[in-house]
Amino acid sequence: VYRPAPRVALNGDFEEYLSRDEKKQRHEIRRKMRRAAESGRARFYVVPKDADIQPELEAFFHLMIQDPNKALFLRDVMRHQMSHTIRAAHEYGYLWLAFLEVDGVKAAASLNFDYNGKLWGYNSGVSRDHMELSPGWVLMGHVFQWCCENGRSEFDFMRGDEDYKYRLGGVNQYVMRVKLSK
């Protein structure tokens, strides 16, 4: 076993997804989404397939580097590689990029690949501003709701064992590493 790769099975019903989660977490997701909606300050949107991806990509990178660990990861070489991967995914229709705006400013982003009836989580970013609205949690609630409403059967975090993935209902699958020798 190389690394855990949590996945969340979805069946098309957001309320059913929430009901599987532990009561406290279910209540938290609903409360945070409701509070953001009632504030009138938050807006969720998915970048259209025909959008000019470059400004959206720059906004995504700006949010991503708000996390010091991701800032270290996103050096020039990695940024270049990710830019090419993201542009290719956009060109072929596999890119799924969503933002949560607060007061008209992008506060959280979720960059994924939409393939084979699933969303595959590639990376995310959250601004340290507007934390009172929990933009990362609110965004993920909207992402899962979108999946349920648009026929996606699963959200695959692809890898990593960060606590929030399990709090959102992730169940481990595993990335395996096999070494063959002669």
Image (cartoon, grey):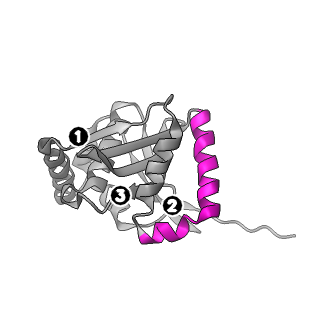
- Characterize the local packing of mark 3: few (<14), some (14-19) or many (20 or more) Cα atoms within 10 angstroms: many
Q: Nearer the viewer, residue 144 or 176?
A: 144
Magenta span includes 129 = no
Q: What distance separates the C-alpha of mark 2 from that of mark 3?
A: 19 Å
Q: Residue at x 30, y 47 (%)?
A: 105
Chief secondary structure of the magenta span?
helix
Report the residue at 70% width, 66% height from top: 178
**Can I make out residue 113 in this image?**
no
Which residue is labeled 3 in the image? 126
Q: Nearer the viewer, mark 2 or mark 1?
A: 2
Name which residue type carries label 3. Answer: Val
Residue at the spot of label 1: 15
Q: Position of residue 147 (x, y in %)?
A: 38, 38
Q: Magenta stretch?
A: 68-92
What residue would you read off at disc 2? 159
Disc 1 residue type (three-letter): Glu
Label 2 Cα neighbours within 10 Å, binned few <14 / some 14-19 / many ≥20? some
Tell me: 94 left or right of 168.
Answer: right
Q: Name above or below for residue 173 compared with residue 115.
A: below
The earlier-in-sequence mark between 2 and 3 is 3
Q: In what element is the residue under mark 2?
A: loop
Q: Quadrant of the N terminus?
A: bottom right
The answer to whether residue 142 is left or right of residue 39 is right
Q: Is residue 61 above or below residue 14?
A: below
From the viewer's perspective, is residue 182 above or below residue 104? below
Instruction: Tell me if residue 89 is in the magenta stretch.
Output: yes
| Total count of labels | 3
Residue that lies at the very extreme toward the right in this rendered image: 182
